[in-house]
Image (tube, grey):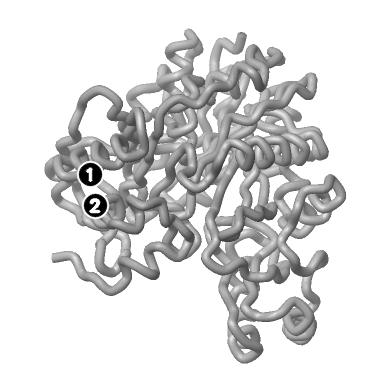
Amino acid sequence: MFTKILIANRGEIAARIIRTCKEMGIKTVAIYSEADKHSPHVELADESFLIGPPRVNESYLNMEKIIEVAVEANVDAIHPGYGLLSENTQFAKKCTENKIVFIGPSPATISQMGSKIEARKLMSQAGVPIVPGTDAALADVEEAVCEAKNIGYPIMLKASAGGGGIGMQRVDDEEALRKAFQGNQKRAKDFFGDGSMFLEKLILNPRHIEIQLLADKEGNTVYLGERECSIQRRNQKVLEEAPSPFIDEMTRKEMGETAVRAAKAIGYENAGTVEFIMDEYKNFYFLEVNTRLQVEHPITEEITGLDLVEQQIRIANGETLSISQEDVQLNGHAIEVRIYAEDPNTFFPSPGTITSLSIPKGENIRHELAVRQGSVVTPFYDPMIAKLIIKGLTRNEAIKNMSKVLDHYIVEGIKTNIPTLKRIVNHPEYISGNTTTNFIESYLKAAKVN
């Protein structure tokens, strides 16, 4: 087993990975920027190294510096967490070149799935259903207009690289497409270094369903049920739950087996997620493969009893899976909400000092925290400061408990989205299981929080 692992990340996910490493008896190395000098993950690690100024391109995205620290600290492996360098082919290659194990899939697999256009082609060849759309990068707006006529409006204009909703926009007619094309292409180029764009038919009132996979070096692959991730704002997830209130056993099995087929088609290894979009008739279509740990992985852990970070480490260490598909049992229901430092009315980030922090504790309450009382939330990074995970025997129990815990979750000194989260979990449409990707826009947009 590895003796020392560097976590190439920050915040709550760095702290979460360190926790599992400690349980496995593995020493940890944290990295931090000048802005994160007092971040909890820095103190939790056995060793910590300053890697640069606050801005991510000078610190957490500085591949050369991170590798330099890893070599200096004599680590066996690097865990990239999610975001930042977790799906960066070049970084995975640099790890290999320096004889450091990258805890994730191979650089080739990351590269294949890094292009949504190439991923669509590969999945189609593997017999995985894909949303009707274009299968090559659009040359210009005129080609986009021509293709859109063939597909039929409304459509989604999408960037081939990256994620997080950047470079993605719903388009309802030709005029809107002409207005949207250049701006989205520029954003994709600026954020991901690739301005390639493509079109997909818009699935109306869809659900965003994803399947968690584990795959070892021998090709053994299992699926760990699904996560419902439809509660989104601007294509970014806000609340996730497992299992989905919309999925029956037959559909779960079909989606799981389809995800396994997709993974095997690309020789996938380690933990990964196949994301699908589903219409109201339970027809599902491939969206993308996330070649990393997901933000929402705790809800899968809660209903399966598996530690996904431990599984990642063991697979990266060359171990075969200790479980078969028959061993996977889903027990209870889990919900995760993402707590952001943002104004609940404007959704603008709310940096500042957390003057008071009180989090409820108890059975089936799990917290993943990036902050503590006195922490300074800076404007340099994603505004997510914590995740709250609640498990119940049933979905109704989990919802009721989530509502109670949010009522007693206190963060002062900055604004947060907790009022929005309360409105979601107490809304009749959410309680009934009506969790399409249009939920926030349809039911929450008009109200203001005092």
Q: Residue at x 44, y 23 (%)?
A: 18
Q: CA distance from mark 2 to mark 1?
A: 6 Å
Q: Between residues 311 and 154, which one lies in front from this camera angle? A: 154
Task: Decide which of tag 2 and tag 1 comes sooner along the chain.
Answer: 1
Check residue 422 in the rendering and tell me which mark sits there, or answer none: 2
Q: Secondary structure at mark 1?
A: helix
- Asked if residue 418 shows in the view, the reply is yes
Q: Residue at x 36, y 48 (%)?
A: 384
Q: Residue at x 39, y 54 (%)?
A: 380
**Horizontal relation, residue 285 to residue 249: left or right:** right
Determine which quarter of the picture holds residue 199.
bottom right
Determine which quarter of the picture holds residue 329.
top right
Kind of residue indicated by mark 2: Lys
Where is residue 133 shown, x and y percent of the image? Answer: 75, 68
Where is residue 52 shown, x and y percent of the image? Answer: 46, 42
Where is residue 331 shown, x and y percent of the image? Answer: 45, 25
- Asked if residue 374 shows in the view, the reply is no
Q: Which residue bears the numbered disc 1?
A: 403
Quadrant holding the N terminus: top right
Q: How many marks?
A: 2
Q: What crowding class fits label 1: few (fewer than 14 Cα within 10 Å), some (14-19), or many (20 or more)?
A: some
Q: Are marks 2 and 1 in contact (CB under 8 Å)?
A: yes
